[in-house]
Amino acid sequence: MAGRSDDATTTAPPRPTFREALVVWARIGLLGFGGPAGQIALMHRELVEERRWISEARFLHALNYCMLLPGPEAQQLAVYIGWLLHRTPGGLVAGTLFVLPGFCVILALSILYALFREVPTVDAALFGLKAAVVAVVVEALLRIARRALAGRLSYAIAILAFVAIFFFDAPFPLVVLTAGLAGLGLDRLSRPAAGGAEADHDAPRIPISVVDLMAERGELAHTEPRRGRALRVLAIGLAAWWLPVLGLLAVFGHDSVFVAQALFFSRAAVVTFGGAYSVLAYVAQQAVDVYAWLAPGEMLDGLGLAETTPGPLILVLQFVGFLGGFRHPAALDPVVAGVLASIVTVWVTFVPCFVWIFLGAPHIEALRGNRRLQQALSAITAAVVGVVANLSLWFALHVLFAEIAETRLGPLRFLQPNPATIDWTALALTVFALLATLRFHMGIPKTLASCAALGLLLRAVS
């Protein structure tokens, strides 16, 4: 065993300094286009393949845990890996830099949207973006499915999750919880690692990662669960989360849009599982029908803008928050109110993400290698595929049809688009975007830009 450790250690890269890690996290934040699927792929390439800061097994273990949590799994994965490498400061830096570039861009785009939304050229470009968003979500669905579905049982779970959400309107938390419990009762959701004992015998030929080397040297003591540390994390996290909300309540009163948004998006941060794509349907319904912060089609506009920027796709919630503040400014200037609402929305959306990781990751690390936990996490990952499939169909229906009726037969719910209201131009743009992304592998920024340009052209000649 000693010889094996020495052989593996000689292949390990040097541990990055905090400054080196900061540069890499900033790079990931600036280049993190393509939604969660693209951002996870980017982190895998940067951290697993090129720099070997973390092994494939640990990366997937952390990813499965993050997909179990409410909120954006890609940002939480960055926090997790940053925490493994450089403790709490590393997690704070990784998670913040993952969000900061996108926050700045979305804020600027939200201001432009609110001020110039009615300009015909802007409306035409947004029309093209909506069609492209359908293709982007479909591509994300396929990429997640390729990663998550590895056998008949995982396919069955994904299908059942889709049916539960689309036809029975089941809440996301219930679907995720049911999938996790089902996973605990199954012997296996994916094929066992090939080679068995032979794979272990060949292990010295596998380059060791920085985190694995740290584990061999006893430098991962911060990953061990401790009750005192957990209580401190919980107390500090809750204070950071809720003290600003109490400040808003004291300054603006309980009827203000800022307090309403702080409470609503805090609730969304707790109950919406499955990442950014799964949260959108819930937020769209509440923000449009209950709070009237934006119109039905504007949610797709916001998603199109979020797809063109780096950072987590869930930053579309910042767009929702900005419009709510802009349109309900009370005594403030509308733009100032929108900026404040943006900050409130982002704060209560992402502070819980840090809490989930710092509180739960030590326990997940302690259970690494536990087969039953892996089965539960794999089942949840499979259920997420069904959640995203539901969102893909929901977006497609609302982009392509002007009228969609909802009928119920007992517990069953059916969405019935009116064929007479189909938008053939939107259909043509959607087909173009699907071919560009799936057949010709055009990047997401190029696809979005092309569809925006085509939207301008088609609206000009129509």
Image (cartoon, helix red, strand yellow):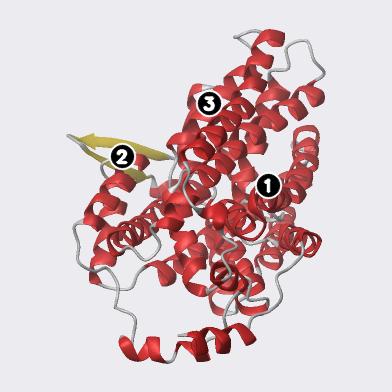
Q: Earlier in the sequence, mark 3 or mark 2?
A: 2
Per the image, the residue denoted by label 1 is 92
**Tag 3–tag 1 contact (CB < 8 Å):** no
**Tag 3–tag 2 contact (CB < 8 Å):** no
Kindly identify the residue that appears in the image at 24 percent across and 56 percent down: 184
Give the answer, above or below, for where 262 lies relative to 197: above
Q: Is residue 192 visible?
A: yes
Q: Earlier in the sequence, mark 1 or mark 2?
A: 1
Per the image, the residue denoted by label 2 is 169
Which numbered disc covers residue 29? none
Q: Disc 2 marks which amino acid?
A: Asp
Give the answer, above or below, for where 218 lies relative to 48: above
- Of 259 and 110, the residue lying toward us: 259
Q: In screen coordinates, is 41 left or right of 272? A: right
Per the image, the residue denoted by label 3 is 264
The image position of residue 200, as x and y in percent, is 39, 86
The C terminus, quarter of image: bottom right
Q: Is residue 292 visible?
A: no
Element carrying mark 3: helix
Q: Residues within 10 Å of mark 1 (few under 14, many from 20)?
A: some
Q: Disc 3 marks which amino acid?
A: Phe
Real-space CA distance between mark 1 and mark 2, rounded to the nearest whole angstrom: 36 Å
Kindly identify the residue that appears in the image at 68 percent across and 18 percent down: 328
Q: Residues within 10 Å of mark 2 (few under 14, many from 20)?
A: some
The image position of residue 396, as x and y in percent, is 47, 53
Give the answer, above or below, for where 362 lies relative to 19: above
Kindly identify the residue that appears in the image at 61 percent across and 47 percent down: 303
Task: Give the label, 3 or 2, closer to the camera.
Answer: 3
Kindly identify the residue that appears in the image at 25 percent across and 57 percent down: 183
Q: Residues within 10 Å of mark 3 (few under 14, many from 20)?
A: some
Real-space CA distance between mark 3 and mark 2, rounded to the nearest whole angstrom: 20 Å
Q: Disc 1 marks which amino acid?
A: Leu
